[in-house]
Image (cartoon, grey):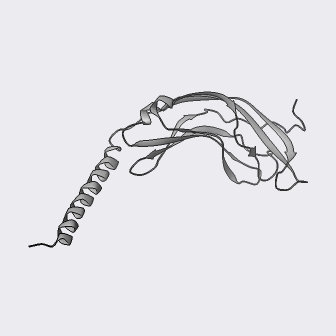
Amino acid sequence: MHSIFARVNNVSATISTTVMVLLSAIALSSFIFTPHPTGSLEISSVKVFAGEARRYPHRRQEYAFVTFNITADLSTLFNWNTKQLFVYLEAEYTNAKGVRNEVVFWDRIVRRKEDAVIAVSSKNKYPFREVSAKFKGSTPANYTLKYNLMPFVGMLTYGEAARLMEPVEFPMARERVE
């Protein structure tokens, strides 16, 4: 006859094995569906202004202010294994020193399928500044709307919902807002 501890051990091993098989099946089943998010991105204007750097009070630095329009339908990314979606707008450019930069200047967290249709007309949420202090000599920026799919179980999935077809140049810096 088995002791009570052996029976509890046997039952808990069976339950944990069943749960692990179920979670693995859920994670693998989310790879069966291939989502096709659609979207469009339009950059209305890019303005560059000189300003004081926050950490160094007497250092001048240039800040870019981007006005954009986003329309995207990301509802195809939602299934039974989707916890949330992190959507962000990224600018990619190479500065005058040859360093490639990827700057996130707007983002949103989408937790429900009903909120996955995005229509935004806005400007950057976060400071868009050049680390080398000036945008002069930088290549034109490529703007992309990207997403990060966070599942309940499984691996994170990254993707692209919209991309601007042609890069946008940085204008010359102005001293003040007009």
Q: How many marks?
A: 0
Q: Nearer the viewer, residue 104 or 154?
A: 154
In the picture, measured across the screen, residue 155 lies left or right of residue 168, that is left
| Outermost residue, left side | 1
The residue under the point 50% across, 41% down is 85
Is 105 on the left-hand or right-hand side of 73? right
Q: Position of residue 73 (x, y in %)?
A: 49, 29
Residue 118: give x, y in percent of width and height.
55, 29
Judged left or right of residue 152, residue 144 is: right
Q: Height in image: 109 above or below 57?
A: above
The residue lying at 61 percent from left, 33 percent from top is 164
Which is more toward the observer, 175 or 6?
A: 6
Residue 91, quarter of the rendered image: top right
**Quadrant location of the C terminus in the rendered image:** top right
Q: In the current view of this chain or complex, which residue is farthest to the front?
A: 4
Q: Residue at x 38, y 43 (%)?
A: 81
